[in-house]
Amino acid sequence: MDRTKADIGRTPVILVHGWAGSSRAWDRVSVELITAGVAGPVLAVDLPGSPSGGTTGDPTIPSAVDHVISIAESLSSPAVLVGHSMGGQITLRVHARRPDLVAAEVVLDPAYGAAASDAASMAILEDAIRSSGPGALVDFFESGFGQLDADNRETILADLHATCSGVLASYLRSEYLDPDSIGFRPSTEVAAALRTRPLLAIHSSERAAGIERELLPPPGSVVQLWHGHGHFLHLEDPERFAHVAVNWLRDMDLVT
């Protein structure tokens, strides 16, 4: 799509939350992105099944992809897609399916590239969620908190407990266990090969960053490893994330 000089710098940004999350997880990040120089609209979405409510559709990855595509289609120009964890899998699938709607993609510890040998443990986790509810995931979520402050920890756990067990289990299965899922590396590779727009990928582990590099993202892409951070690294240091993202977007004339 051709863009006039007036369009440059006003690229929309769509923020996609992770598993058991909601749009409010992006509140501080949205402010920091605008402060750092994003002039276009910054839209934090609630996926189907989010505890924020109000979003229709099945709690599955394909349904969430459809939801994000519908938002992107309503905008006047291609958007920068930003996804955390499960949200990164969703932005990848939107990017692969509708590159015409994407100016660039940013992923933060995305939920893809897992080892296929983890399938059995994913099925066990699904069963635990269905039998014990969100409480089965508290230790798992807390293990990724890193240096998060108390307010962010409280928000994340509140969203987790407000998400029904059926939604949690459905998304997990849709990410990794359904026939069309892309969470395990062989399927991730197929989907990632369809990316055509630049990617900024920020990871908290060397293993995941290495896998990202091996996926051979398009020209202009950058993969960063943030040492010493947990899974919610953008919430640990939202100002750093905003500056890294905006400076990268500025290099591509997507932000002035």
Image (cartoon, rainbow, N blue to C red):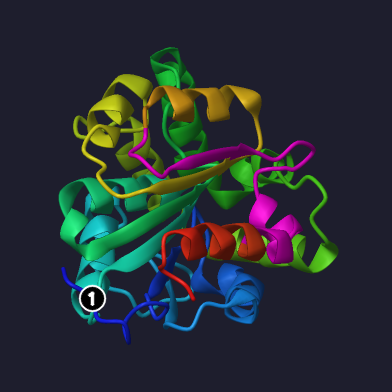
State the image coordinates of residue 11 (x, y, percent, origin top left): 37, 75
Q: Is residue 209 above or below residue 238?
A: above
Extreme-front residue of the structure: 5
Residue closest to the eye, 199 or 116: 199
Q: Secondary structure at mark 1?
A: loop
Q: Is residue 178 above or below residue 236?
A: above
Q: Which residue is located at x 32 percent, y 46 percent?
A: 92
Task: Say which quadrant the N terminus sits in.
Answer: bottom left
Q: Which residues are magenta?
A: 217-241
Instruction: Name the residue carrying label 1.
Output: 3
State the image coordinates of residue 185 (x, y, percent, origin top left): 36, 22
State the image coordinates of residue 2 (x, y, percent, origin top left): 17, 72
Q: Which residue is located at x 31 percent, y 41 percent?
A: 174
Image check: 20 left or right of 190?
right
> Identity of the amino acid at label 1?
Arg
Residue closest to the eye, 48 or 43: 43
Determine crowd level at label 1: few under 14, some 14-19, many 20+ residues with C-alpha closer than 10 A: few
Q: In the rendered structure, does residue 193 fall within the stretch colored magenta?
A: no
